[in-house]
Amino acid sequence: MEHTTTAHANHAADARKEIWRVTGILTVLTIVELALGFYMMNVPLDEHSKRSFIKGVIIILMISKAFYIIAYFMHMKHEVKNLIMTTAVPLTLFIWFIIAFLYEGNSYKNLRNTYDGHFRDRKEIMAPAHKEESIKEIKAVEPKPAAE
Amino acid sequence: MWYFLMSDAFTFGAFLISYGTIRFSSVGWPDPNKVFKSYPFASESAYAPLVFVSIMTFILIVSSVTMVMAVQAGQQMRKKAVVVNLVLTIIGGLAFLSCQAWEWHHLFTEGAWWGRNPFPNADGTIASTNFTNYFFTITGFHGFHVFSGVIINIVMLIMTLTNQFEKRGHYLMIEKAGLYWHFVDLVWVFVFTCFYLI
């Protein structure tokens, strides 16, 4: 009797330790993501490849955070393999989903820049410098109340 | 619950991927560090990018940890620990909702809303309203999930306090509520990365 109580208590203690370990990992991953975000603020906008590389690293960190939350917080790691497969396999559709739509968005931009003069011109318009002016501009285009 | 979460994952995924598509199809986009730079009780000229959203992320992760503790306590039939951890999770959820409500209100006072975007693009050109439309829609949809998660957790708390689970002999329902709560945290990880970081 005592053996099973001790074994039970040990298992519970191990489970708690695992959760705190994963919490620590998630905290570290979040801090690294935020540090990269802060660093990226000082990388000028025209250094595209450097910015894209940092964004790629942030995305990889985000996905590893997702894996830790699903596996340990949602207990997926300890579930039956077939259940894991029924959820993991459909989610691979996201890979196609993301690549297809981002590629298409980019292609749309390139086509519009090539063929749509109005789109090309519109991107040259500078925003009003002063904040009050931009709010005035927003108020100006709001529909007038049909009181009259 | 796992299969409902799959459907919800595809819904959020669709929203976020459409956000990505529109961003990829736009020449300019506002710099999130210039937009989200304030926090409660800060001065008008405060420049603290990523600070407030980091606090929100931390609150939600900690509430997920307390939810795991509640589930584990339920597995060991420890009712008091379940109650304590559920209460902490509910408080975390309400704190997150309050922070999000402040963020929305603050942006609203700056002139942002569906159909209104006062923030210029990073290169100074005039921005489209896609930025604010997507921000409010996706964070609103997520906030609605946090809100429903808090309601579900309150129901779980009441059921625990009225000994429903003791009568059943198991706390498995708390585990299912836990899955929903972790899903909400997981979605926030993606939303905060997409809008504030990249």
Image: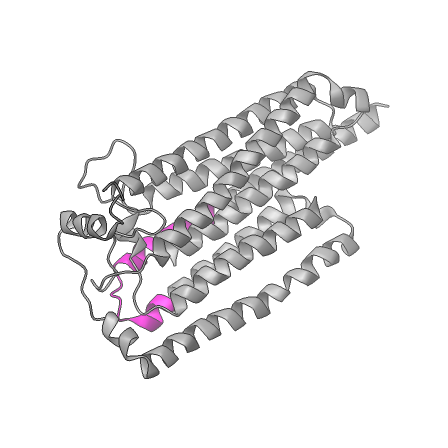
In this rendering, the answer to whether A113 lies above or below A60 is below
The question of residue B181 being in magenta is answered with: no
- The residue most toward the top is B162
Question: Who's the residue at 73% across and 17% down the image?
Answer: B163
Q: Magenta: predominant secondary structure element?
A: helix
Q: Nearer the viewer, residue B121 or A1?
A: B121
Left or right: residue B9 compared with residue A49 = right
Instruction: Tell me which corner region of the image, top left, top right, bottom left or bottom right, holds residue B153.
Output: top right
The picture places residue A85, in percent across and down from the top left corner, at 74, 58
Left or right: residue B146 compared with residue B40 = right
The picture places residue B80, in percent across and down from the top left corner, at 65, 18
In this rendering, the answer to whether A44 lies above or below B168 is below
Question: Who's the residue at 52% across and 34% down the image?
Answer: B147
| Residue A56 visible to the viewer | no
| Residue A2 visible to the viewer | yes
Q: Nearer the viewer, residue A76 or B20?
A: B20
In this rendering, the answer to whether B188 lies above or below A48 is above
- The residue most toward the right is A1
The picture places residue B107, in percent across and down from the top left corner, at 30, 43
Q: How is the image coloured?
A: one colour
Question: Who's the residue at 36% across and 49% down the image?
Answer: B114
Per the rendered image, the range of residues in magenta is A27-52
Please identify the quadrant where the C terminus of chain B is shown: bottom left
The picture places residue B136, in percent across and down from the top left corner, at 40, 47
Q: Nearer the viewer, residue B195 or B106?
A: B106
